[in-house]
Image: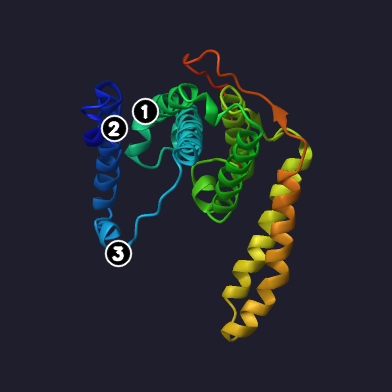
Amino acid sequence: MSYLLQKTNPVVAEIFSLMSRDEARHAGFLNKGLSDFNLALDLGFLTKARKYTFFKPKFIFYATYLSEKIGYWRYITIYRHLKENPEYQCYPIFKYFENWCQDENRHGDFFSALMKAQPQFLNDWKAKLWSRFFCLSVYVTMYLNDCQRRAFYEGIGLDTKQFDMHVIIETNRMTARIFPAVLDVENPEFKRKLDRMVEINTKILAVGDTDDIPLVKNLKRIPLIAALANELLAAYLMKPIESGSVDFAEFEPQHITNSLFISNP
């Protein structure tokens, strides 16, 4: 994007260049961390083995904004927790999370500015539907994935579900500044639906671990997938919160409460 925009919009081109610099620094931290465990990742094959898929710009803006902001809340929450509980700081990379998360926050602000500069992405009924869709997709994906990796979060003293709900709520409040509609994630029913999705997803994964033939596995998955889809649809259809503003931007430093998420022994 930086190369393509150098002549038509040098300011935006420079911002994309700076963001790529930040992401390269993040990748450097991760590669250094992996090398400590004699591991290495070569993602160059993706550009050769995977085909590029076209997405409308507004979908990229919605998804990237949410990805950056939810990343900010994940990192800053972990950083603040480990700062208050250093006995759980099991690896040096966590010491860099504060600056790392601020990178994510700034990147999200940039995409917020892009959307505010294109109000047609935010000011109609379709934008409200898409906003809720992307919020639900990002929140559910994080919740289900993290519940499969509880050992990591418990290892650094966090209660996984409590941590995830805190991240979802704070991300949603921030997202409400720009998206025309967001999910009512603070409604207790929303968390109950997430927990039911976790239960169903666990059963789906368990089917895959059985010795049944593929046909039998697929037949067993059908009612579970249908139940998961039903919970997703029910969560999507919950009364949303009307929000957003295309009149002004609020790019002020964000603060997080110093809540503790210590897991039970």
- Quadrant where the image shows the N terminus: top left
* Callout in the foreground (1, 3): 3
Residue 39 visible, this orientation: no
| Residue 145 visible somewhere in the drawing | yes
Q: Determine whether label 2 and label 1 are within 8 Å by CB.
A: yes
- Give x and y (percent) for residue 211: 58, 84
Residue that appears at 52% across and 54% down: 149
Q: Position of residue 50 (x, y in %)?
A: 33, 61
Q: Which residue is mark 2?
A: 22
The residue at which mark 1 appears reads as 103
Question: Can you tell which quarter of the image residue 106 is in?
Answer: top left
The tag on residue 49 is: 3
**Marks 3 and 2: which is nearer the front?**
3
**Which residue is rendered at x = 27% and y = 24% of the image?**
9
Work out whether residue 234 or residue 77 is closer to the camera in this orientation and state it: 234
**Alpha-carbon neighbours of circle 3 within 10 Å: few (<14), some, or many (≥20)?**
few
* Image coords of residue 158 (percent x, y): 56, 40
Q: Look at the numbered disc 1 and give the secondary structure of its residue.
A: helix
Residues at discs 3 and 2 in contact (Cβ within 8 Å) = no
